[in-house]
Amino acid sequence: MQRVTISLDDALLTVIDERVAAHGYQGRSEAIRDLLRAGLLEQAADDPEAPCVATLSYVYDHATRELSKRLNNAFHEHHDLTLSTLHVHLDEGKCMEVSVLKGAVGEVSALARQVMAERGVRHGSAQIIPLEALVAEQ
């Protein structure tokens, strides 16, 4: 590991110190490393051809007409991207699914947008992690 010296204004340092306390970091260096990694992941996710892994989580109303069929079709059309899916019954009317995906950022993002845009999907979120950024950390 190499030591790098940076200058930060007082306001930014205060925010970092608050993050250290709130997240339980042992020091500023760990917090700053995590923030840098997050920024690099975000930048790598801009390349639609970059390989990635992702989680797609969404809550939907299972009574919405033909929604289960439409969701099933979307995942079958992109079977090569899906590694695994967890289905949870939240109550009598709502279900949550979490899918683990792997493929090109552009294809994974497109599938996530398609699923989250379906009528009856109430909440959705995709966490995309470009694999190139993970390799760069090693």
Image (tube, rainbow, N blue to C red):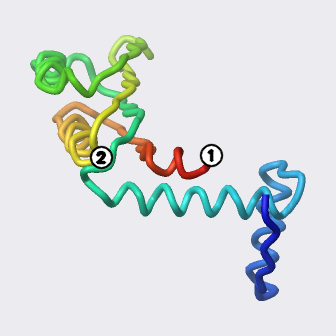
Residue at image point 64% right, 61% down: 35
- Give the side of residue 82 with respect to residue 29, left or right: left
- Give the side of residue 6 with respect to residue 65, left or right: right
Q: Secondary structure at mark 1?
A: loop
Q: Report the front residue among 68 and 30.
A: 30
Q: Amino acid at mark 2?
A: Val
Residue at image point 21% right, 41% down: 107
- Give the side of residue 14 with respect to residue 103, left or right: right
Residue at image point 45% right, 59% down: 42
For residue 25, above or below residue 126: below
Q: Secondary structure at mark 2?
A: helix
Quadrant including the N terminus: bottom right
Q: Amino acid at mark 1?
A: Gln
- The residue at the far right in this view is 26
Query: Residue 32: x and y, percent?
Result: 73, 64
Q: Report the front residue among 66 and 6.
A: 6
Q: Residues within 10 Å of mark 1 (few under 14, many from 20)?
A: few
Query: Where is mark 2, residue-wise?
Result: 105
Q: Report the front residue among 120 and 9.
A: 9
Query: Where is mark 1, residue-wise?
Result: 138
Residue at image point 75% right, 59% down: 31
Query: Residue 93: x and y, percent?
Result: 33, 16
